[in-house]
Image (spheres, coloured by chain):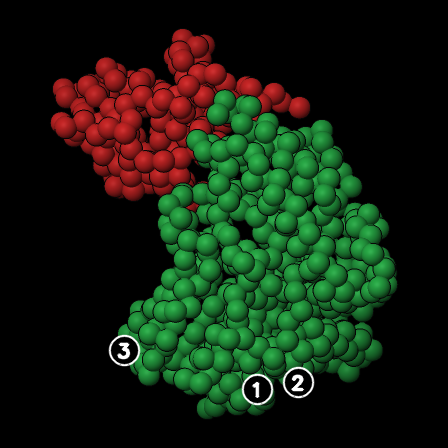
Amino acid sequence: MSHPASAPDDPYDVERVRRDFPILHQQVNGHPLVYLDNGATSQKPRCVIDAISDYYLRDNSNVHRGVHTLAARATEAFESARTRAQEFLRAQDSKEIVFVRGTSEAINLVARGYAVPQLKAGDEVLITEMEHHSNIVPWQMICQETGALLRVLPIDEQGELSLDQLDDLMHAKTRVLALTHVSNALGTVNPLAQIIRKARDKGIVTIVDGAQAAPHMRIDVQKLGCDFYAFSGHKVYGPTGIGVLYGRMPLLREMQPYQGGGEMIRKVSFDETTYADPPYKFEAGTPNIAGAVGLAAALDYVDELGLERIARHELTLLKYATAAVEKVAGIRIIGRAREKAGILTFIIDGVHAHDVGTIMDHQGIAIRAGHHCAMPVMKKFGVAATTRASFGLYNTHQEVDALVSGLHEVREIMGT
Amino acid sequence: MNDLRELYEEVILDHNRNPRNYPRKPDDATNSAHGFNPLCGDEFFVHLTVVGGVIKDAGFEGAGCAISTASASLMTEALIGKPLAEVEALFQQVHALLTDEAQVGNPEEFLGKLTVLTGVKEYPMRVKCATLAWHTMRAALHEKSSTVTTE
């Protein structure tokens, strides 16, 4: 069981929070680790590590088969993780939660299982210019197969969606809208409720990439009104290799499985197989049980700490970091949306992001350098690569100070 | 801890700030190739003019980090005037220098100025930056593919 660092009304005690994360307390290249790559993956609190370890030490067995005690315990743990994910997303029914490997697999599942049977040549799939490659490539692949067209809603100079073009791009031929909740490269928080309302009015099926949103804000899929929502466990302080696809039940019933095997069937003969009901028909084979158990512990952890308080802490850091980084000469911040989550992306005049990454690492600072799997965003802003600092619930103001002094060191070393 | 100055050596910084034979494609270029590192987006085009078994001219275009840019710049300098027969040996020497394989003979003698790349081998994540232009050059000469990637 996790121990919240403080009750909901207490001030946010980041030092106590940090004690829950063993990995943070180490030296890297002779400096205390400053981990600012949370957008790539987050670190794990001890309660998550313990939950996985306890599962293997005590309860490990296969799920949904066997009548012995351990099988019952494993099944109970796995299914209560499903209920936990349902509560986390405020979904109506735990059967609307499909366990997958991560957001990428969730999007591929919807593209294959739902969109392909629906799409005809000349239909359109709408995405946005700020999508991660994982919300571009699956749609490109199925458009090629079906003859559907991929349309792209552009972003503006601030890194916000050009909503004035939305009406033109959503029309009678548009079948699917796939968009991100929070941009991994820019930090932009999209006005989802407003966009989804429009899509629904036009009968367009919506899928939201929530990979960067789940760690930073309260999500309510019923209020958002989306048809599908996906997130990855490892970005929300859970383990890798487990993620969640939420789908509204009527759509999940229509959706075709894309892998066959055990677990996903009701009845098999050589003439015919009938599939199990959702979510099981999408979960062929033995699932990542320990991953689901770890994910449930992670969701407990962030909920006990309070997503609203986490969001407040991260936004304070973002504001402080934005002001401080901006003051460093020769720095241009990419992504100036009015509403942002804890992501700060920038370029330094005359210094490539990879050189920034190496010099930062030398000071124990982990940041992301590169194209962030969002090459179209890089192209839009005319850069090949950027540097990204992304904040998590355990980051501190002192770590932002370390980032800023690291940037001065970069300029010093590179002689710019 | 390694000194960052061994990586960002003065010669490397100079070649990053003022890359030689860049951005340039010789008018009489006979061999060209495209090199790409999909992990970071670094991308170079290497152009060579080969006449009578000798590299008469070399240039490159594209964009990358300080290590890949300096390595490409230093490479074009080293190649100009070199007989093709010696290019493969030079490639192998540079490769050995970057990946810490056993050197044959004295690297200074073979590599001259290129030894400034020595510091890269302490940074395994950056070795591909330094080798990108070299693999691209090799592809240009062997014409087996117009694009090489580091992956």
The hue of chain A in the figure is green
* A260 left or right of A376 in image: right
* Earlier-in-chain disc, 3 versus 2: 2
Q: Name the side, left or right, on which A223 lies relative to A148.
A: right
Callout 1 and callout 2 share a chain: yes
N-term-proximal mark, 1 vs 2: 2
Displayed quadrant of residue A91: bottom right
Q: What residue is at 30 percent from the left and 71 percent from the top?
A: A149
Amino acid type indicated by mark 3: Gly
Crowd tier of the residue under label 1, counting other residues whose Cα lies within 10 Å: few below 14, some 14–19, many 20 or above: some
Q: Position of residue A45 (x, y in %)?
A: 77, 55
Measured along the vertical axis of the image, is residue A93 above or below residue B78?
A: below
Image mark 2: chain? A
Q: Secondary structure at mark 1?
A: helix
Which residue is at the front of the view, A374 or A395?
A395
Contact between labelled residues 2 and 1, with CB atoms less than 8 Å apart = yes
Q: Residues within 10 Å of mark 3 (few under 14, many from 20)?
A: some
- Residue A378 visible in image: yes
- Residue shown at 63%/58% (left/top)? A235
Residue type pointed to by label 1: Met
Indicate whether B131 appears above or below A89: above
Disc 2 secondary structure class: loop
Query: Residue A130 falls in which quadrant of the image?
Result: bottom left
Residue A93, label in figure: 2
* Residue named by callout 1: A249
**In the image, A249: left or right of B145?**
right
Q: Colour of chain B?
A: red
**Mark 3, residue position:** A122
